[in-house]
Image (tube, rainbow, N blue to C red):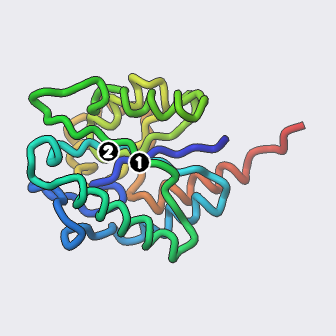
Amino acid sequence: MKIVILDRDGVINEDSPNHIKSVAEWRPIAGSLEAIAKLCQAGFRVFVATNQSGLGRGLFDYDAFCAINDRMQKQLAELGGRIDGIAFAPDPPDAPTPRRKPGPGMLLDLARRLNASLDLVPVVGDSWRDIQAARAAQARPVLVRTGNGRRTETEHRTELRGVAVYDDLATFANALIAAQHALPPVR
C-alpha cells in the first residue's frame, strides 16, 4: 500500500496564526489540491494528520471543522483526488495528549487502522512538530517551505539534516511520483 500523510494548515491550505475557523477562511495553497489529485491518480492513498487546537479552545466547533474538510474534499473530487482519512487532535498545546503533534499518536493510530508500517511513509509538514512526530512514529519526515516551513527550515537547520525539503506540496508530489516510476520492476 502506497501511503502519504499530510499536515493540513500550511501544507494543503494557507495557515493563519488565528486558526482557520470557517470555510470562508480556508484557501488552498496554489497547486496543493492538484498535487493531491496527482498522488491519488498515481496510486497513493492520502491521509491528513492535523493539530486543531482551535476546537479545544472553542474558537470553532466540529460543524465548522467538518465543513472545511468537506470543502477540501469537494474541490479535490473535481480534480480527481481525495483524502482517504483525516486524523486530528483537538487538544490545546497546554494540555496535549499523545495524539497532538509533536507526539506520534495520530500517525501511529493511522498505521494501526491501516495495518501498515510507517517505515517508508512520507509525512509532509511545515512545522518542527510535524518533523518530530514523523520521527517518533518511525515514518519519513518531509518539510515543505509553505506555511511555517521557511521559518522551520531556518530555525532547525541542523536538526533537519537528512530530512527532504521541498518548496511546496506540488514539488514534493512530482518528486515522489517520479521516484516511484524510476524504481525497477519487482520480480
Q: Which mark is residue 50?
A: 2
Image coordinates of residue 159 in percent, x first then y, are 31, 28
Dot 2 amino acid type: Thr
Horizontal relation, residue 22 to residue 162: left or right = left
Q: Quadrant of the C terminus?
A: top right
Dot 1 amino acid type: Ile
Horizontal relation, residue 140 to residue 135: left or right = right
Q: Is residue 176 visible?
A: yes
In what element is the residue under mark 1?
strand
Whole-angstrom CA distance, mark 1 to mark 2, is 8 Å
Image coordinates of residue 2 in percent, x first then y, are 63, 44
Residue pictured at 40% horizontal, 31% vertical: 134
Residue pictured at 19% horizontal, 59% vertical: 20
Report if the CB atoms under discs 1 and 2 are less than 8 Å apart: yes
Q: Earlier in the sequence, mark 1 or mark 2?
A: 2
Reply above or below: 96 against 143: above
Image coordinates of residue 22 in percent, x first then y, are 19, 65
| Residue underneath mark 1 | 86
Image coordinates of residue 91 in percent, x first then y, are 19, 35
For disc 2, the neighbor class at 10 Å (few under 14, some 14 to 19, many from 20) is many
